Image: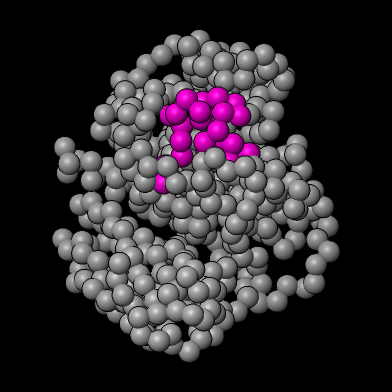
Amino acid sequence: MRIRRTLLLGLAASLVAAGLVVPTLRPAYAASLAEVASFGDNPGRMRMHVYVPDVRPARPAVVVAMHGCGGSGPGFYSGSEFAAQADRYGFIVIYPTATQQAGFGNCFDVWSDAAKRRGGGSDPVSIISMIRYAQQQYGADPGRVYATGSSSGGMMTNHMLALYPDVFKAGAAFMGVPYNCFANAADFPPTSSQCTGGNMNRTPQQWGDAVRQAHPGYSGPRPRVQLWHGTNDTLVPYSLLQETIEQWTNVFGLSQTPTSTDTPQANWNRRRYADTSGTVQVEAYSIQGAGHSLPSGGMAASAVQFFGLTTPPTTPTPTATPTPTTTPTPTTPPVAGACRVSIAINAWSSGLTENVTITNTGASAINGWSLVFTLPGGQTVTSGWNATYSPTSGQVTARNVAYNAGIPPNGSVSIGFQAAHTGNTAGPGSFTLNGAACTIA
């Protein structure tokens, strides 16, 4: 059981990068990801990162893009194509980072009583605070707010659409589950979950009633829903796609029989469910042969098209001409012992994720940093977040990115990477920051 749990944890954590494509390369002058330290009521103790494109309309749309278990907002930014779409079409992307554990780590809370009540607390309230912040800070359009996410983030996508139909206009859930699928925290881990155990089967009416009870008395328009699932997904079983279709078609009062089916791309089988006016309210993609590895190339673009956000901005924001982003030159090395590193490793049969926290224990601020460490034999970095990594094996140097170059005294930054391994899942034995040795916590 422990081996299986470790494997599942690794699969969930690998969602940050495994099967995801590197975003389309953007010009050097493109905007960068920024963290917002204080964004309002935050009962879920979440972190917020935001990507604001340099060119956008006066009232840009907002897309909330949510990672899978074991991931992070910056990781999903790096491992998905939503920021590239934002550059092209001028919408803002919010990347929340979950901190709930539920036996996995960094999973969005879709199980607690608080999270299932509109305004009840936990992660949903934190996400709404992030949206309100974007509207106040950047003049974002309250009528054009969208949700998307992968695995745990896909689950939270359906969750937010059910709780806050008056906030969201549409959503795209990758590898999610229906709203109110999990009974409680004990039901969340795939090893023991009734929801993801492969035998969940409720009637469309039961699923639809769950959504209607999330916001009793609500009679306004509902957000349109796009669903994606791989036919070979065993972590979040493919059968849950049908349950989710039944939920949302029932909410919209639609037939369980699609109004159209097609294959817009090889191995993408699409079912569409339109209302009497011809508007597609629900559409579902079955990705033939795919496992727990979505979104992959082109899927973010399809989600953005479903949202109706494919009109390029014509009015640039009143800012100066963008200049290339440069990485600060590392400061002189801190004195020995003026840095501390702690690591947390989640490993499975052929891979691992390693989260690294760097703490400046010196008296002076660090502006620009390079962290050098040696990977154990057989390990190769396949992707990373919050830093650039080179080379991918042997002695590796992790360098800051634009938004985390500074580390104040007693301050910390968190970075991480995913690696393949051939059996050795140990962490590096030593770290140097700007040439000075760090202690390991």
Residue at x 37% of width, y 42% of height = 101
Residue at x 70% of width, y 43% of height = 132
Q: Pinpoint residue 274: horizontal percent, then vertical percent.
A: 63, 22
Quick check: can you spot residue 382?
A: no
Query: Which contiguous range is marked in magenta?
Result: 106-128
Q: Main secondary structure of the magenta part?
A: loop
Q: Pinpoint residue 418: horizontal percent, then vertical percent.
A: 34, 60
* Residue 163 magenta: no
Residue sitting nearer the eye, 398 or 245: 398
Residue sitting nearer the eye, 269 or 209: 209
Q: Is residue 424 left or right of residue 28?
A: left
Residue at x 77% of width, y 43% of height = 141
Q: Pinpoint residue 77: horizontal percent, then vertical percent.
A: 52, 56
Question: Which quadrant would residue 303 be assigned to in this image?
Answer: top right
Q: Is residue 261 left or right of residue 9?
A: right
Residue sitting farthest toward the front = 363
Quick check: can you spot residue 73?
A: yes
Q: Is residue 302 left or right of residue 385?
A: right
